[in-house]
Each structure stands twice: as structure tokens, then as C-alpha cells.
Image: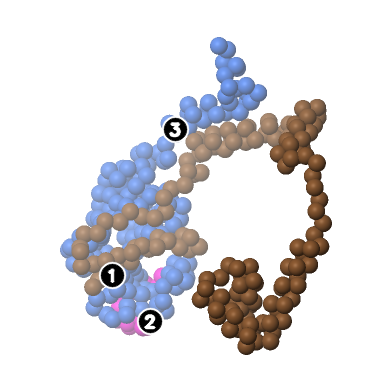
């Protein structure tokens, strides 16, 4: 029996199948002993769950229960002392902006840091000649290949 | 309002100062000196799987360029048919005759760009604009195509900066 057939059996027991699909499953159950065994096991499991599940009544409503948790969290947050920034964090507050500003200053003042466009701009003058370009980073080469038709 | 009370300076006076200096002086720094001459080398190269014809005066390529081309293109042999070296002042245009059928017109457009016009048998076929910075970084600009006269061979025009 396939996995799909097993899923169909479960859906059939849960009443989720169409009339046509349910008829197919019924035929399968009638013909296949493995399918019958699985159906029996599933029915038994469902019955045990229904009968054996312990009811656990909550004295408060669901909304009141969660609002109590929310209030407790807020109270804990209000009373907790703000964490003192670590030495690392204090250093980062100083170093990060200086680093960013220095990088920006180098970018503007050192022309070599400004990345120039690597791919050439190409104009085609003859319509019967197509071209394509590619760039090899490893070889440091921009190629414009002109293909004549 | 005191300058140090501005948000950009608050707590990060040094960073703000560096930032301000960069903004004031950075953009005025040119990419390269405006009147600097650009020196270019153009090579016309033949790519083939055949051996060099005995009567031809083609030059062997320098090993570095031959290896670069060989790593990208399929041909076994690359022979230099001709070579031109030229200096270009900003705004200057020069014509370079690479062979009877191949001419280049190179123009130093502005401090950042050159324009290369490729003529095949007298007809303008391509105009390529390339960054001078890219060339000065040592990169190669290669215009290439199939050899119309010889099946499965190719031609290459390699433009490099000689500084």
C-alpha cells in the first residue's frame, strides 16, 4: 500500500473525501487486508484518544490567563535594571562611526578606491554585425566580440 | 546653536570632523590630472591553429599576453601583425592604421574615458568607450572577431595602457 493510499484511508475515516474518492477507498478496504488492518488500527487509536484523554479544566478564561502572563512580563521588565553597556559595546560606539567616516574620507580623497566601470560601452554601427562583450575578472580583460553574419 | 551640539558631532566629534573634511575636499580631487597624457598601445593579433607562415613577418606575442589570450580563447597560436603606440592629450583624436583593412580612431574623450572607433575595410563597425582607470589598472580591452578570409581563425585588437 502506498503512502498516498494510507493518507486517503485517514482522510476517509475523518470524512474528508468526496463521494467518488470515498467509494475508491471503500473498494480498497474491501480488497486489501493491509488496508483493513490500518483502518482498524486508526479507528482504535481514535477511540482510545477520545475516551482516554484527560480533561484539564482551567479555572480562568483563556484571555485572562494570557493577560496575567503579559502583566507579569511587563512588571519584570519595568523593575529590571537596564544592562550596563559592556566595554566592547562602548568601544564599538566610538570605533564604528570613526571607521565609517574614515572610509568615506578615503573614498573621496583617494581616486584609486573609486571603482571604475569595467565593462565598456559599445555602439553598433553596422546592423549586419552583431557583437557581445564579456569580462574576465581573472585575466583582467574586457572582450568585445564582433560576429559577422 | 553651537556646532558641537549638532547631531552629527554629538559624541563623535572626530568622526564628524573627518566626514566634513571629506565632503569639503573630496569631490574636488580629480580622478587623474586633467592634462595628463594617456599612452596607449594597440596590437593587431591573428589567432590561428596553424603554424606561422614562413614568409610572414609576424611577431611572436609576449608570453604574458599569449597566455592570457590562450586561457580565454581556443586558438593555439597568436601572432602579432602590427603594433602602434601613441600618446593622447585630453580631447585629442588620432587614427592608427593597424593593417590594410583595419583602422582605429582613438579619442581621449575626458579625464575618465577614451573612445575607440574600429574601422573594417574603411567602414565604421564599432565604437567602444572604455574607462581610462580600467586601462591604467593594467586591464586589456580586446576587440575581436572571426576572420572573414580564413575559416576558423580570428583577429584581435588589444588596447592597453603603457603609462
Most foreground residue, B57 or A44: A44
Chain B, colour shown: blue
Magenta residue span: B49-62
User: Disc 2 is attached to a residue of which chain?
Assistant: B
Location of the C terminus of chain A (image quadrant)? bottom left
Q: Residue at x 63, y 68 (%)?
A: A14
Most foreground residue, A73 or A131: A73
Would residue A37 be found to the left or right of residue B38 on screen?
right
Q: How crowded is mark 3: few (under 14 residues within 10 Å), some or many (20 or more)?
A: few
Lower position in the chain sequence, tag 3 or tag 2:
3
Q: In which quarter of the image is residue B78?
A: bottom left
Q: Which residue is drawn at 20% across and 67% down?
A: A128
As helix, strand or loop, the secondary structure at mark 1 comes to strand
Q: Quadrant of residue B57?
A: bottom left
Residue of label 1: A147
Chain A, colour shown: brown
For the residues marked 3 and 1, what is the alpha-carbon distance in whole angstroms?
41 Å
State the mark number for residue B27.
Answer: 3
Tell if the residue under mark 3 belongs to the same chain as the one under mark 2: yes
For the residues marked 1 and 2, what is the alpha-carbon distance in whole angstroms?
19 Å
3 and 1 marks in contact (CB < 8 Å): no
As helix, strand or loop, the secondary structure at mark 2 comes to loop
Amino acid at each position: 500500500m502506498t503512502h498516498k493510499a494510507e493518507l486517503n484511508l485517514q482522510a476517509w475515516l475523518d470524512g474528508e473525501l468526496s463521494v467518488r474518492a470515498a467509494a475508491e477507498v471503500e473498494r480498497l478496504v474491501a480488497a486489501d487486508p493491509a488496508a483493513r488492518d490500518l483502518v482498524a488500527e486508526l479507528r482504535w487509536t481514535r477511540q482510545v484518544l477520545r475516551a482516554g484523554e484527560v480533561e484539564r479544566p482551567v479555572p480562568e478564561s483563556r484571555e485572562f490567563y494570557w493577560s496575567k502572563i503579559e502583566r507579569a512580563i511587563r512588571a519584570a521588565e519595568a523593575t529590571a535594571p537596564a544592562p550596563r553597556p559592556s566595554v566592547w559595546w562602548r568601544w564599538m560606539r566610538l570605533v564604528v562611526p570613526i571607521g565609517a567616516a574614515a572610509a568615506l574620507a578615503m573614498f573621496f580623497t583617494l581616486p584609486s578606491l573609486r571603482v571604475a566601470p569595467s565593462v565598456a560601452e559599445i555602439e553598433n554601427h553596422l546592423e549586419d554585425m552583431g557583437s557581445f562583450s564579456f569580462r574576465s575578472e581573472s585575466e583582467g580583460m574586457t572582450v568585445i566580440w564582433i560576429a559577422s553574419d | 546653536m553651537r556646532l558641537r551640539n549638532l547631531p552629527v558631532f554629538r559624541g563623535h566629534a572626530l568622526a564628524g570632523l573627518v566626514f566634513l573634511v571629506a565632503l569639503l575636499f573630496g569631490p574636488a580631487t580629480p580622478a587623474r590630472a586633467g592634462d595628463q597624457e594617456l599612452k596607449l598601445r594597440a596590437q593587431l593579433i591573428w589567432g590561428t591553429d596553424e603554424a606561422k607562415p614562413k614568409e610572414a613577418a609576424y611577431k611572436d606575442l609576449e608570453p604574458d599576453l599569449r597566455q592570457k589570450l590562450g586561457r580565454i580563447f581556443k586558438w593555439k597560436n597568436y601572432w602579432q601583425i602590427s603594433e602602434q603606440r601613441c600618446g593622447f592629450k585630453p580631447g585629442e583624436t588620432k587614427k592608427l592604421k593597424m593593417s590594410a583593412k583595419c583602422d582605429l580612431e582613438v579619442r581621449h574623450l575626458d579625464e575618465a574615458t577614451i573612445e575607440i572607433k574600429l574601422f573594417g575595410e574603411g567602414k565604421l563597425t564599432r565604437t567602444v568607450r572604455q574607462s581610462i582607470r580600467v586601462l591604467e589598472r593594467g586591464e586589456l580591452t580586446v576587440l575581436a572577431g572571426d576572420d572573414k578570409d580564413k575559416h576558423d581563425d580570428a583577429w584581435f585588437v588589444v588596447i592597453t595602457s603603457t603609462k
